[in-house]
Structure formats: structure tokens, C-alpha cells
Image (cartoon, rainbow, N blue to C red):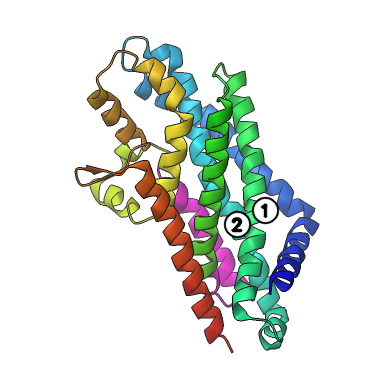
Amino acid sequence: MMNTLVILATRNIKLYLRDKLSVFFSFLSSLIIILLYALFLKSNLTAASSQGVGFETYSSWFVDSWLVAGLLVINSITVSLGVLGLMITDQSKNRLRSFLIAPISRNTIVFGYVLAAWVIGSVMTILTFILGEIYIVINGGELLSALAMLQVIGLILLNVFSNTSIIFCIVALIRSEGAYQTFSTILGTVIGFITGMYLPIGLLSAPVQAFTKFIPATYGVALTRQVMMRGPINMMFKDAPQAAITRFEKFFGSQVFIGDYQCPPILMIMILLLSGLVFIALSVMIINRKK
């Protein structure tokens, strides 16, 4: 099974990388988001985050870190979605039917697609992280410590695993390339808003904020921001009480509250891990029902 899994995953990776234009646009989309943010959003967010003595000194570093952390999670979703489109292509060209009637476990087929999307999504998102760090330093921010970088990379691997599993489960229900393109467009449009990527979560309405608690990516964004925003927040709130820091972090989405309960990092990590495992199991059930 392991050899077959590696062969299927390698085959999917090669097919994705063969489309050089798709790989290029994966990077270009991240650069466009940063550019649009710098041109239209940064000034407002910087002003919103600098309402305090000395805040203006570190607000640009804070907002840049806030953006890059959100971008990493969004990138893990969009890249994985692009890779998993291979299954729709295989289905439309009857390749998937060949896999299903071959002496290959249905579990192996699922893991082959998920593993390929996880590998490519992780690599592309880590490269985006490197570009993001360069952008932060160029704009006057500070480079993350080696330990913080390892933490971010670990969160990238976990986020990609969770998001890939969820997306595969949905894509497994799609039967046509047209439906897949529609789903990709809708997901790419709304995911940035409902996870607090494009604007602080505190600016969303109460019902939308409550809805975000049911999306695992929300916890991935919060965890990544906790690590990347730690430096500027420590400087901005050097002598502030913890309650003020918590309110600020809640507004900008690096802390998640369910009612009055503040989710600890270990709980958010478990949500991401369990969501990935649960949706992989659901994906296997869906593929097993395909004839």
C-alpha cells in the first residue's frame, strides 16, 4: 500500500507542477493580495492599531505581521484547492474510473490526492512565508526568531493538513469541472472575510463572528497570528495590563473566544488535527460509495 500511495502522490505532484502557469499564479495571487493591502488597507489598519502612546512606532510591523499570518492560511487553502482539482480532471477524463476498478484500495486513492496536495500546499505556503518575512523586514519590522519560524512552519504543516482534508471531502462530491470552478470562485471570495483575513474579526457582525467558530481555518489563523504578532504586541503593550492585550488580540483575531471562554492554543491545535482526521474519514466513505 505504501509504495502505491507514494506512486499516486508522486504522479499527482508531477501533473500539478507540469502546469507552470498554475504554479506561477499561485505565487502571483499572494503578491497581488500584499500589493492591494499595501495600497488600500494598510493605512486604515495601521491607524486602527495605533490608538495608544508609542503604538505608532510598531503599528506598521504589527499590521504587516497580521496580514502575512492570515495570508499563509489563505494560501494553504487556495493552493490545496488547485491541486485537488486534479481529481476533477481525472474524473472528467475517466482516469478516476480506472483507479476505482483497479486493484487499489479506495483509501490509497484518497491519501494519494491528499498527500500530493499537502506536500505542494506546504512547500508553496512556506515559500510565501519566506517572502512575507522579507516584506516585513523591508518595511521596518523585525525578523522572527529561529524558534518562532519553526513554530510557524509547524503551524503551516498542520493548517495545510486540516484545510486539504476538508476541501478534498467537498471536492469528492463535485462531478463536473464547471461546478468545481464555481466552488473555487466562491471559496476564494468568502474565505478571506469569514476567517478575518481581509479585516479584523472584531469588525464583523456578531452572527458572522459566531459562525467563524465553526470553521477550523479560524483557529489556524489565530495560532499563526499569535506567533507572528508576538514581537510587535510585546513592544506596543510593554507596560499594559493583560486584559488590554487580550481585548486587542481578540479584536484582531489572534485570540478566539467561545462565549466567555478563551480557547487555549492546545485546544485550537486539537481542533485542526481532529478536523483533518474526521474529514479524511468522510472522504474515504464518499470515495467508497462511488461506482
Helix, strand or loop at mark 1: helix
- Residue 5 in percent (x, y) is at 69, 70
| Residue type, mark 1 in image | Ile
Tell me: 164 left or right of 198. right
Look at the picture and state if 183 lies above or below 98.
above
Label pair 1/2, CB-CB below 8 angstroms:
yes
Residue range highlighted in magenta: 170-198
**Is 172 colored magenta in this rendering?**
yes
- Residue 18 in percent (x, y) is at 80, 58
Tell me: 140 left or right of 232. right
Q: Is residue 283 visible?
A: yes
- Residue density around tag 2, few if under 14, some if 14–19, many if 20 or more, within 10 Å: many
- Which residue occupies 30% across, 35% down? 250
Which mark, residue 120?
A: 1
Viewer-proximal residue, 214 or 44?
214
Which mark, residue 96?
A: none
**Disc nearer the start of the sequence (1/2):** 2
Look at the picture and state if 287 lies above or below 181.
below
Tell me the residue that label 2 is attached to. 80
Q: Quadrant of residue 54?
A: top left
- Residue 143 in percent (x, y) is at 58, 22
- Which residue occupies 60% across, 71% down? 178
Tell me: 65 left or right of 203. right
Viewer-proximal residue, 134 or 175?
134
Q: Is residue 43 visible?
A: no
Q: Quadrant of residue 3?
A: bottom right
